[in-house]
Every structure is written in C-alpha cells, then in structure tokens.
Image: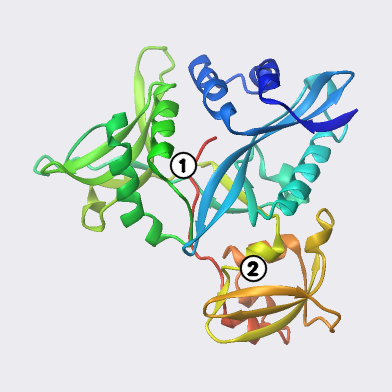
Amino acid sequence: MRTRYLDQKEKEATRTLYESAFPSDGKGFVDYYYQEKMRDNRVLILEEEGTVRSMLHLNPYTVSVRGRRYPSEYIVAVATDAAYRHRGYMRRLLERALLDMNREGKPFVYLMPAAEAIYLPFGFRTVSSQISCEPVQNGESAVCSRPAGTDDAARLAAFDEKYLQPSYDIVTVRDAAYYRRLLAEQQSEGGCIRVFERDSEFVGHVLCDREEGEDGRKCKETYRDPVLMPECGGILRAVEKETPPLIMIRIASLERMAEPVTSDEPVELVIEVDDPIVPDNAGIFRWSLDSGGSVVRVCKEQPEWKVKIDELGEFLFGVKTAQEWRSEPVFRKLQAIRPFRSVSIQEIV
C-alpha cells in the first residue's frame, strides 16, 4: 500500500471511482471534468496491489491576497472505494497533500466539504459560503442580459479586475483562460454565464445554473457568484439558502501565509504554534508585523501566545476576532493586527 501522484495517462482510470462516489454529477459535467480539469491538476491516490482505493484531486488556482499573488490548490473529488472506507485512507492522503503543499510554499489550501465535521480534525475551518441571488424584476430598467460567449472571456476578466478584486482581501484570480474554462463548465450542465449590459457596456455578470424539475421537464434557473458595478447592485438580490455550499481553508505554509498579514502599527509577537500534521508550521516563532506585511522566524524566546494552527487560521481569516483573547496579555497586540475580512472563493471544482 502506498500513496503517489498519477501520471497524466493514468488519470482516466479514476473515473469509475469518481462516478461511484459522486452519482449526482451528470455525464456532461463528468465528461467536462475529465477532459478539461484533469489536464493540469494533480491526482493523489492510495493504491493497493495496483488498484486505486482512495483519491483526492488538487486543482490549481492563483489567489490574490491583498494584492499579492500566490499559487494555491483546491482539494476536490475526495473519494474512497466503498469497500475500503473507515480505514484511515483519506487521512493518509490529506496529510500527504498538506506536507507537499507546505514544501511547495503554498500559503493555504481550500475545499468545499460534503460535511464540515470531516475536515475539522485536519485543521480546516469554514471561512465563507457561496453567494446565491435572484434577479429583481424592473420593467423600466435599461439593463439587459444575455448568455456570455467565449469572445466575452477577456471582457469578463477585465471587469473582475476592476470591480471584484479590489473588494476582497482574498480572491481567486480570474483571467480570460479562467473564464473560457468556466464557461465550458457551466455549459456542461446546461448553465451559462449571464452578463448584464447597459448601452452595450458590461455592468455585471452572474453564474446561471439550471435545476431540473421533479417531472424531468421543467427547469429552474438559479444564480450565484454575482459581480456588479456598485450602482447596478439593485438588479439582483441575495437569496438565503438553508445549507449553502461552504469553503473551508487550512494554512499550508505558515511562513508564506504570514507575508500579506499587516498591522496598524509595528508589532513584535512571540507565538508558539501547534500543528500536529505539518512540522514546519509548529514551534516558537517571532512574528514581526507592520503596515507592509509580516514575517515569522524561528526563535527560542518565551511565547506570548500559544495557538493551534486551526485557531490561527480562524484569526487570520476573520472567523474569530482579537476579542476571543481579550483576557490574555497578548490582546493589545492582536488588536493591532489586520486579519483578512473578506474572502471570495466561489469555484465548484
């Protein structure tokens, strides 16, 4: 029994496991995934006697963190053969992936969980949920909509660079290639990217999914991941879902994750981090911060703040505030640190 990454020509052999683990994914989507996403991702497997028993896929994305760009990985298609579950196979794969991404200098990794509880023991924490919306009927509006085509990819990317990226501390970088691929993904299940225009000028866009009715004929359009000009925000309204898809994040490299973290004033803080999976993230560090960023260096000083890697992630990604530690001497220093307050990661795969 061993874990390893598949060669490109071996990836197709995992389709049977994928289809058995995710039966709700339609054939069109699975065809798209194996033709398109498998071209540049990595597939980590646990195999026994030459047979794949468990797998996870690492789909590459570039993320912008306060204007700095980093490579990251989106963990998807985590699956184990039904006859081999509850043997710790998924644990072995997740731990191997986290160690590899630490060595590669990836600041963090993320996933969309089937259930949050599965990933909590590995240091993942929920930081955001998918944004769903619906159109607002306004017969007098000068804004019209249409499905985007591949020729719109560059305009969509330019629109996001102007209106999406400045609005978030952490956001997936979307270029023209990203949108060409996303358009194919949407079309694989009958959806589209719907663009909004006023006098032929882009004023926004939204992902449009099609949900088949119970009778198999009536289809309902649902909308998610809206990006609009501020003055056109009224053409869509948010919709609360009972269980919206969630994004969970886990620090992979503490050293790289610290780089874009800033503070309102210069701060010197000695921290002791507990990371039971990634040894390079564990130990005592001097954390030096200012308005331009921060750096962590291994030291032998007395720690002022003892924190687990998942708690540090919750603090950095704005899930917990400094108020959680208001009774500790370190509170004033934590107050000066500026966590990431907004995250936009809306991808499905």
Foreground residue, 314 or 11?
11
Q: Could you tell me residue 273's position as x and y percent?
A: 79, 68
Q: Relative to residue 220, is residue 42 drawn left or right?
A: right
Is residue 191 in view from this perspective?
Answer: yes
Instruction: Please determine whether, in this image, residue 270 is positioned above or below residue 255.
Output: below
Q: At 84% from the left edge and 84% from the top edge, which residue is drawn?
A: 302
Label 1 is placed on what type of residue? Lys
Foreground residue, 242 or 186?
186
Task: Find disc 2 in the rendering and name its residue.
Answer: 258
| Residue 241: mark | 1
Instruction: State the image quarter where residue 286 is shown.
Output: bottom right
Q: At 70% from the left edge and 51% from the top edge, which residue is drawn?
A: 104
Q: Could you tell me residue 189's position as x and y percent?
A: 43, 22
Question: Which SS class for mark 1?
Answer: loop
Say which quadrant the N terminus sits in. Answer: top right
Foreground residue, 217 or 146?
146
Q: Residues within 10 Å of mark 1 (few under 14, many from 20)?
A: few
Gap in Å between the C-alphas at discs 2 and 1? 34 Å
Label 2 is placed on what type of residue? Ala
Q: Could you tell me residue 252's position as x and y percent?
A: 70, 55
Q: Residues within 10 Å of mark 2 (few under 14, many from 20)?
A: some
